[in-house]
Image (cartoon, grey):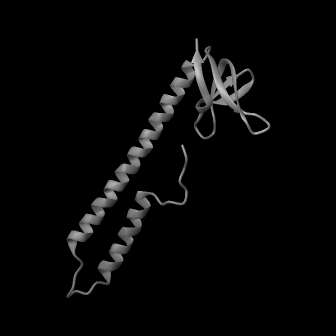
Amino acid sequence: MAAITSTASASDIQMDYMKLLVTQLQNQNPLEPLDNKDMSAQLAQFSQLQQTENLNTSFGKVLESVQRNYASSLIGKNVSYKVQAEDGTSETKAGQVEEVSIADDGSALLAIGGQQVNLADVASIRD
């Protein structure tokens, strides 16, 4: 799962907006107050954005769990997988899955004949 570091979270954006809103309210012209409808609509949009962000995080965790379970079901099975040769071409190898480990980025790695293979590189599975 790729992390987005340059984009602020919905909570951060909402907090910045609230600070700006408080400053606006403190400095507004009493004869022309801010429109409550616009403020309410913007706050609702921030709330929706935050809920969407939470859903994406939850779905990412579910996907990682499903991938781990699937990878562990491959232990003892023969698989073929693609690897990049030294000359830059792609070749297919085969072997039996001996072990499953989890990489730092959360992806499942299969140990096949002393080689670490990413689950995404598996081309076919045989019993």
Determine whether, in the image, residue 20 is placed left or right of residue 116. left
Look at the picture and state if 108 lies above or below 72. Answer: below
Determine whether, in the image, residue 57 is placed left or right of residue 30. right
Q: Nearer the viewer, residue 54 or 112?
A: 112
Residue at 52 percent across and 24 percent down: it is: 70
Residue at 60 percent across and 17 percent down: it is: 75
Indicate the position of residue 32 as horizontal and vertical percent values.
21, 85
Look at the picture and state if 95 lies above or below 14. Answer: above
- The quadrant in which residue 105 appears is top right
Look at the picture and state if 105 lies above or below 18. Answer: above
Q: Nearer the viewer, residue 6 or 17?
A: 6
Q: Nearer the viewer, residue 116 or 18?
A: 116
Indicate the position of residue 82 as horizontal and vertical percent values.
66, 29
Residue at 45 percent across and 34 percent down: it is: 62
Look at the picture and state if 59 lies above or below 5. Answer: above
Determine whether, in the image, residue 110 is placed left or right of residue 86. left
Indicate the position of residue 29 as horizontal and vertical percent values.
26, 87
In this view, which residue lies farthest toward the top?
127
Q: Quadrant of the N terminus?
A: top right
Indicate the position of residue 34 as horizontal and vertical percent values.
24, 78
Residue at 42 percent across and 45 percent down: it is: 56
